[in-house]
Structure formats: structure tokens, C-alpha cells
Image (cartoon, rainbow, N blue to C red):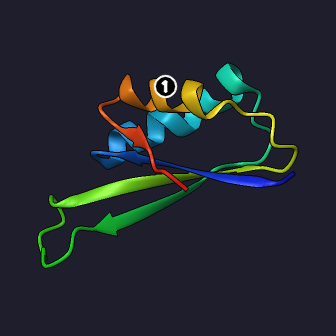
């Protein structure tokens, strides 16, 4: 069953590091998508979270492990 996981990170640097680590750590073959998510009502670029969208076509990634991984970068796995 295909799934999509969204990791929320505090800044672009953390998000880019997570993208680089995903292949080696979790065997993610497809390049994750990096998306800037401005916080509601905030115009300043500093007040943005970054999302890393990971496609999991085989449903083999462990959400708990992804959440722990994101926490290493002060982030979290968004609940579906």
C-alpha cells in the first residue's frame, strides 16, 4: 500500500540534511520533495518550516523510526 510521509523541520538547512540522510538510512530510492511552509500570518522568511515529503510506494517505512529521525533535527513526522 502506497504511503506518503511528511517530515516537518524547523529550517531549510535541517530539511536539506534530512533529504541527504534518507537514502542511506532508510533506503529511500525516490528523491524526497522539499517544500517551504510559511506559518500562517507570518511574512518573514525566518518564520517558515520546511517539509520533506517522502513517497513510500511499498509502505515499508516505519513511521515511528521516521519520527525519531526527524526529532534528531528538532522536527517531527506529521500525523496523516
Residue 3 placement, left or right of 40 = right
Q: Quadrant of residue 14?
A: top left
Residue under the image location 27 percent in, 45 percent down: 10
| x and y percentages locating residue 37 in the rendered image | 35, 66
In the rendered view, does 32 fall on the left or right side of 37?
right
User: Which picture quadrant has residue 15?
Assistant: top left
Image point (12%, 74%), residue name: 42
Does 37 appear above or below 11?
Answer: below
Work out whether residue 13 or residue 79 is closer to the camera in this orientation and state it: 79
- Element at badge 1? helix
In the visual, does 20 lie left or right of 27?
Answer: left
Name the foreground residue: 73 vs 2. Answer: 2
The quarter in which the C terminus is drawn is bottom right
Residue density around tag 1, few if under 14, some if 14–19, many if 20 or more, within 10 Å: many
For label 1, the residue is 69
Residue 54, how many percent across, how many down? 65, 49
Question: Relative to residue 68, is residue 56 depicted above or below?
Answer: below
Identify which residue is drawn at 46% across, 41% down.
Answer: 16
Q: Could you tell me residue 7's position as x and y percent?
A: 48, 46
Residue at image point 30% right, 56% down: 49
Amino acid at each position: 500500500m502506497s504511503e506518503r510521509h511528511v517530515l516537518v523541520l524547523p529550517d531549510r538547512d535541517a530539511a536539506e540534511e534530512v533529504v541527504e540522510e534518507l537514502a542511506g538510512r532508510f533506503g529511500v530510492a525516490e528523491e524526497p520533495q522539499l517544500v517551504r511552509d510559511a506559518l500562517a500570518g507570518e511574512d518573514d522568511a525566518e518564520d517558515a518550516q520546511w517539509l520533506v515529503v517522502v513517497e513510500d510506494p511499498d509502505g515499508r517505512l516505519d513511521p515511528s523510526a521516521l519520527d525519531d529521525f526527524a526529532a534528531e533535527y528538532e522536527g517531527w513526522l506529521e500525523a496523516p
